[in-house]
Image (cartoon, rainbow, N blue to C red):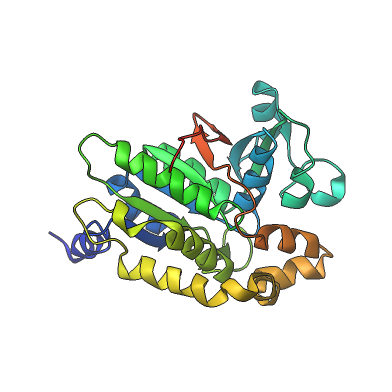
Amino acid sequence: MTSGARRAHHLTQDDFAYRFDWGLEGLTALAPQATVVIIVDVLRFTSAVSAAVEGGGTVFPYPWAREGVDAYAAERTAIAAGRRDGGGPSLSPTDLLTMPNGARIVLPSPNGAALACAARDLGSLRVLAGCLRNATATAHHARHLLRLRADRTGGIAIIAAGERWDGADGPLRPAVEDLIGAGAILAALDPSAAVGAPCCSPEAAAARSAFQQARPKLFEVLCASGSGKELLELGWEDDVATSAALDVTITAAELIGDAFVAAPSLHET
């Protein structure tokens, strides 16, 4: 076994029911052992997905740099999202809250959408889009999916998308809003749901603690973050506020085939 393989083995967190990591590398490490993968990109992809499916919309994630988005959208009878100032659908969760019921959009994103597509391509059993808006709904749905697994193994892997230094092709920049969003979902997971393993990995516990510290002032923290400042400079404080709203929907977003839709009701108690 090479030293690299040893490192990979130690980074899977598979001794724990609830796991947390960052970006494509974290997804690649955790997804093969997980029953449920939750992608978190608070500013703004997964908040946008949540906003869209709240109103009965369908969202097709699409990697940012890949060409052919218009043809891809046409094949799915969908509208390709563009820039917010273009007047049509975009990554703005505020605008997507007003989308017509049943609307179908293709939503490109260099972080959240790319990870959702990667999770699907890695063969992840169930993929959810989590954020602050749907944190508890996502936790409940993930917990139920974990309980449904016949062999009672696997776990829940929460992957924070982060941002990029120097544009879409730069190295990963861990983004505090995604740490907090992941922590909100972890805080909502019931420790009694863990089957045969301790609940949170140390990585997951750290994310949960970050959320608990930020919870009284989520909007202020998101505004002060690097990503939040960028949106404020563009005049999009409304998107920060929409993304900072905690547990305002009971609808989880699940990737079914190649699209995020409202997760089926599980009648959880």
Q: Position of residue 114 (x, y in %)?
A: 54, 47
Above-or-below relation of 74 to 66: above
Q: Residue at x 69, y 75 (%)?
A: 220
| Quadrant into which the C terminus falls | top left
The number of numbered badges drawn on the structure is: 0
Task: Give the residue displayed 54% in from the left and 62% down from the top.
Answer: 181
Residue 171 visible? The answer is no
For the residue pair 201 and 122, the one nearer the viewer reads as 201
Q: Quadrant of the N terminus?
A: bottom left
Side (left or right) of 8 relative to 212? left
Q: Is residue 24 left or right of residue 229?
A: left
Q: Position of residue 127 (x, y in %)?
A: 45, 41
> Can the viewer see residue 147?
yes
The image quarter in which residue 96 lies: top right
Q: Position of residue 105 (x, y in %)?
A: 69, 34
Residue visible at 37% across and 56% down? 190
